[in-house]
Amino acid sequence: MAKTLFEKIWDTHAIATTAGGSTLIAIDRVFLHERTGAAALKRMAEMGRKVRDPARVFAVMDHIVDTRIGRGDGTLMQGGEGFITETRAACCEAGITLFDVNDRDQGIVHVISPEQGIVLPGVTLVAPDSHTCTQGAFGALAWGIGSSEAEHAMVTGTLRLERPKTMRVRIHGALSPGVTAKDMILTLISQHGAGGGAGHVVEFAGEAVTALDMEARMTLCNMATEFSAMTGLIAPDAKTFEYLSGRTYAPDDFGDPYWRSLATDEGAAFDCEIAIDASAIAPMVSWGTSPEQAVPVDASVPQGPARAHDYIDLDAGARLAGTPLDAAFIGSCTNSRISDLRRAARILEGRRIAPSIRKALVVPGSLAVKRQAEAEGLDKVFEAAGFEWRMSGCSLCFYAGGEGFPEGSRVISSTNRNFEGRQGPGIRTHIASPETVAASAIAGAIADPREYAREEQAA
Amino acid sequence: MSAFPQPLTGRAAPLLVDNVDTDTIIPSREMRSTGRTGLAEGLFAPWRYSDADARIENPDFVLNQPDYRGTPILLGGANFGCGSSREHAVWALAEYGIRAIIAESFAPIFHGNCLRNFVLPVTLDRAAVEALAGKTIAVDLAAQEVRTQTDVHAFDIDPEAKQMLAEGLDAIDLTLAQASEIEQWTAADRTARPWVYLEPTR
């Protein structure tokens, strides 16, 4: 019988049925971070439980680590150091591989897991972090869970699951210059709602998806959680295997026919199908307080919930482009990889951000990304343009109580969440691609990045 | 935390907003230790306090109104609990005393976190949720019903989740009872997919 990629992975990992009718699914990889993983490790120790196979559990310090150059365990967030020291001690006790604060391979969990070849096509990977779906870009079943479930996965090597439904999102055609994977996922969520993927595993397919490089595929899958899907995934292809070959934890070669079987069979049925035309996608910017409240950069603000208009201080009918900004952020598990930084730097090269921008940060997704960017001179481009260049971490994707944006700031941000207060109390966030962040920082107001794409094409 | 009360009764506090996210339920800056306690005070901090640092209450917030203060039952809109996976959101709700949330729909990670902490997520259609606002209701897990003085709303729940909630069962203990099946499967899998199994390298 024809199967979807999800069904193949599910069936491979189904160990048994429980008395209550759920399925025990084998978990191949667990990744923790200091923010939610520490709680799982602490509870496990209190219960006298042990990690079943520590070699397949990894941890990293990314969420509240300081990102200023020269950092140590100290955090700008009060009490943050305790999360770091407790996580370190607990990882040591449990025998878990830890990418520590200044480890050369440190970085945001969903950036370093692929860099290290920890995620692989066909595996199950969980982390107590909602953006674990990012790693579905490699054809893995990778999803976010709570700390209790992380403890369950570490102790038993399994999770008890109800089988989700399946959805395929086919994106056909080609993206226009200046339009990115970030704009693809924001288009999907704005058209089908922040709850549009609920109960489903979403497979992204179609020529506009296969045309993406691995880093852009990660951006696309990253926001499946903002669609309320269990996760997103993309069938592995030559690009996937080439990316993973030679990585520390990946197999030596992907020649076995098994790897090619990891694809949805012709004729396999999904519970739901959505089609999107890539050529109709424009650079997207959020106007409100949910990722579903996003529109093309050249559109007007539509009518939405009063609460969202009040918080973001934009009325229906207002032009989004031209809205004055106070700050800019490039980073996060959505858009902090080398290709993201290269594209933003291309726009910023030889230009300055507007004087009205009071804070502008570039936070590389990993120390490996940081080294690569520095080798290419991108750090100098960002600094010359007026951005601060940082160590890797989640940084101001969310406000933890330490570093923040200036009070009342309106921020253009390459992150994934524009929730009320996400980047600090009263801070108004507009999420967009790194290109749009760069173009907007130069203008000091929300701006369309396509003018730079046109300029580049003309040159 | 313990088994779900049978039945749970209380005044249904309406928070009828769509896409209530876990950053709002418990902001990152309110998560001050690696433990699961000390979170109730930070629950809904951005909405509950007019000055969160000074803990000055916003009288308009539903849980600050005398009728709803300390209620065990919260009503929500669509996609309740979206965003971050932080289980702290459910720990904060449970520590405050919320034992049932009745909403149009739930975000999946939050839904799972509720079940693991014996907080019952009940899904009802929007009209039914709105009709419960402000009423004293009974949430009956055994009968799978939400009852007011005049109406009965049936709800669905996965049978395993229902049993675990009703009996206060620990998921890890239940799964460890199937440890031999897991061992057998793993032994076969080591041969089938050797690349999955790693040696400690660092």
Image (cartoon, coloured by chain):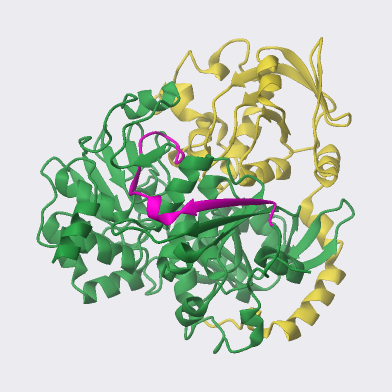
User: Chain drawn green, letter?
Assistant: A
Residue A218 drawn at (x, y percent):
46, 63
Residue appearing at x 28%, y 35% in the figure: A320
- Quadrant in which the N terminus of chain A is drawn: bottom right
For the residue pair A391 and A44, the one nearer the viewer reads as A391
The range drawn in magenta is: A270-292
Q: Is residue B169 magenta?
A: no
Which residue sits at x=44%, y=28%? B46
> In which quadrant is the C terminus of chain A drawn?
bottom left
Q: Which residue is nearer to you in this view: B9 or A206?
A: A206
Q: Relative to residue A72, is residue A240 drawn left or right? A: right
Residue B159 placed where, x, y %? 85, 43
Chain depicted in yellow = B
Quarter of the rendering containing residue A25: bottom right
Instruction: Looking at the picture, tell me which residue is in the foreground, A233 or B59.
Output: A233
Q: Residue A260, image x and y in percent?
A: 62, 80
